[in-house]
Amino acid sequence: MGRHRKQSPATVRRSSVLALTGLVPAGFVACAAASDLDSDQSAVQQLLADEQDALASRPAGGSIEFVEHSMAEQRSVAPPVVKTVALPSNREKADLPAGNLGVPGVAIAAYQSAERTLDAENPDCNMPWNLLAGIGRVESTHAFGGKADSDGNPLSPVYGPVLDGSLSGNNVIHDSDDGALDGLGGYDRAVGPMQFLPETWKRYAADGNRDGIADPQNLYDAALTAGKYLCAGGLNMRDLAQQSRAILRYNNSMAYVANVMAWSNSYGNGVAPKPAELPRI
């Protein structure tokens, strides 16, 4: 089970805020403190003037397309709703062909979808699907051997052990979500096929299947969130040292890293890992 460490929240520079001021509705800007408005007025006016000059310089026939493209680039996407979706118990298991070394087809689909999304959103990370598969193999055996429906939802919720100190080697982690994600009060436990602690999930939660919800139980959401978590801080998965640092975020154990890397390599080349490559975690 992954044991996640807290990450420092990202800082936002004032210059970044100023650069976005021209995108904020006028009614919202009017609510800002007067001192901030006075100090930023010249910067805002210059931004607006620059935008008007840019529009005026475009050919008449392309002005509309240019404006639409600019608006599309600036449009912010609403964050997904973070929750676990209650589903009926009589769902059918996904019927997709398995991949190398028996990786369930629905799990491969989720890992590869996450790879494509990360390649578009964070190409410097160079996240391969088989690394996510390595994490999924060690954390939950790909949702207990692919026991998930065609939408990537496990047929039964996936939970780790309760982190109350009763299990040797695990941290004591008190409740951080009022049981909303892990269905448990008092203490936390890891959730879903990629085994995220509730607090970590809320910080990195991603909507892998684009349904507006970030559900830690869903394979597509969990795979993309795992990718974001591993890539955080500008890490590059093609650099083995940086890849190791990323995997250690899941579990601060080099034996864990060795297992994940061994399965990742095996899923990539189709050759089963040797026992010596899988030290006991």
Image: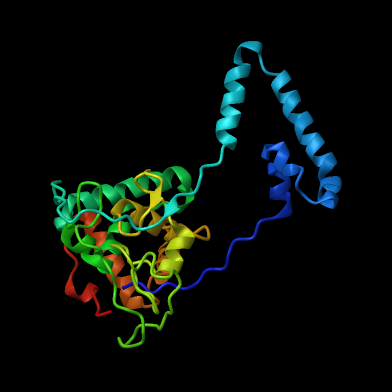
Could you tell whether 42 is left or right of 262 in the image?
Answer: right
Of residue 132 and residue 152, the one placed in the foreground of this image is: 152
- Vertical side of 111 occupied by 210: above or below: above
Q: Residue at x 83, y 41 (%)?
A: 41
Quadrant containing the C terminus is: bottom left
Q: Residue at x 37, y 66 (%)?
A: 196
Of residue 67 and residue 240, the one placed in the foreground of this image is: 67
- Vertical side of 117 occupied by 56: above or below: above
Q: Residue at x 22, y 61 (%)?
A: 143
Query: Measured from the top left, where is residue 259 in percent x and y?
Result: 27, 71
Q: Report which quarter residue 157 is drawn in.
A: bottom left
Q: Looking at the image, can residue 271 be seen? A: no
Query: Measured from the top left, where is residue 197 in percent x and y?
Result: 39, 69
Could you tell whether 80 is left or right of 72 in the image?
Answer: left
Quadrant containing the N terminus is: bottom left
Q: Looking at the image, can residue 229 be seen? A: yes
Could you tell whether 130 is left or right of 82 in the image?
Answer: left
Query: Measured from the top left, where is residue 88 in percent x and y?
Result: 21, 53
Q: Residue at x 49, y 49 (%)?
A: 79
